[in-house]
Amino acid sequence: MPEEQRNELIKILLFNRNVMIMIDSDKKNRASRLNNTKKRIRQEIEKIGAICWITKGREVENYIPKAAIAELYNMNSVRQVDKYQSFNDYLDHIKKGEGKKFLSNKVLFAERVCSHLTKDNIKPVLDLEERLNEVCERIKVWNGV
């Protein structure tokens, strides 16, 4: 992270410590290590009692459940994306050219897949249910609920 962006993050934290940051781990396999920037950000965020969620898989997209993908592409079933797999490669195996479409407009893909996410189909995916519960509980605390 460039120094200017780091300074902006610190300024934001001075105004509001009720933050949660999510960072892709970018791990390509189990042996991959987090880079020093991610470790430093996690340390700074946790030091103020905020939440730093570094994905268990490679990227946030690796949390998308196979049921949502199957519904999105109108298929009976698909396999779950591997936690370290490139998501665009995964989509290309499902339908040729989908990985490139995904990379060119991730927001559009997110809008399309969100309606297929359910409380039940996210349960078995990595640590998603646990992390979402943590975030929800923290938001309740911040709001005095």
Image (cartoon, rainbow, N blue to C red):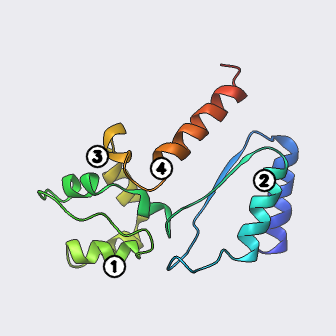
In the rendered image, residue 88, in percent from the top left (x then y), is placed at: 36, 75
Gap between marks 3 and 4, in whole Å? 16 Å
Q: Earlier in the sequence, mark 4 or mark 2?
A: 2
Q: Which residue is mark 3?
A: 116
Q: Are marks 3 and 1 in contact (CB under 8 Å)?
A: no
Q: Which residue is mark 2?
A: 45
For the point 49% across and 52% down, the residue is 127
- Please tell me in which quadrant of the rendered image residue 106 appears: bottom left
Gap between marks 4 and 1, in whole Å? 22 Å
Q: Is residue 20 above or below residue 141?
A: below
In the rendered image, residue 59, in percent from the top left (x then y), is placed at: 50, 67
The amino acid pointed to by label 1 is Asp
Q: Are marks 3 and 4 in contact (CB under 8 Å)?
A: no
Gap between marks 4 and 2, in whole Å? 20 Å
- Please tell me in which quadrant of the rendered image residue 35 appears: bottom right
Q: Which residue is mark 1?
A: 89
How many residues crowd mark 1 within 10 Å: few (<14), some (14–19), many (20+)?
some
**Element under label 1?**
helix
**Element under label 3?**
loop
Image quadrant holding the N terminus, namely bottom right
Gap between marks 3 and 1, in whole Å? 21 Å
The amino acid pointed to by label 4 is Leu
Q: Is residue 106 above or below residue 118?
A: below
How many residues crowd mark 2 within 10 Å: few (<14), some (14–19), many (20+)?
many
Q: Which mark is residue 31?
A: none
**In the current view of this chain or complex, which residue is farthest to the left?**
76
Q: Are marks 3 and 2 in contact (CB under 8 Å)?
A: no
The amino acid pointed to by label 2 is Ile
Q: Earlier in the sequence, mark 1 or mark 2?
A: 2
For the point 57% across and 66% down, the residue is 24
Between label 3 and label 4, give the one nearer the viewer: 4
Q: Which residue is mark 4?
A: 128
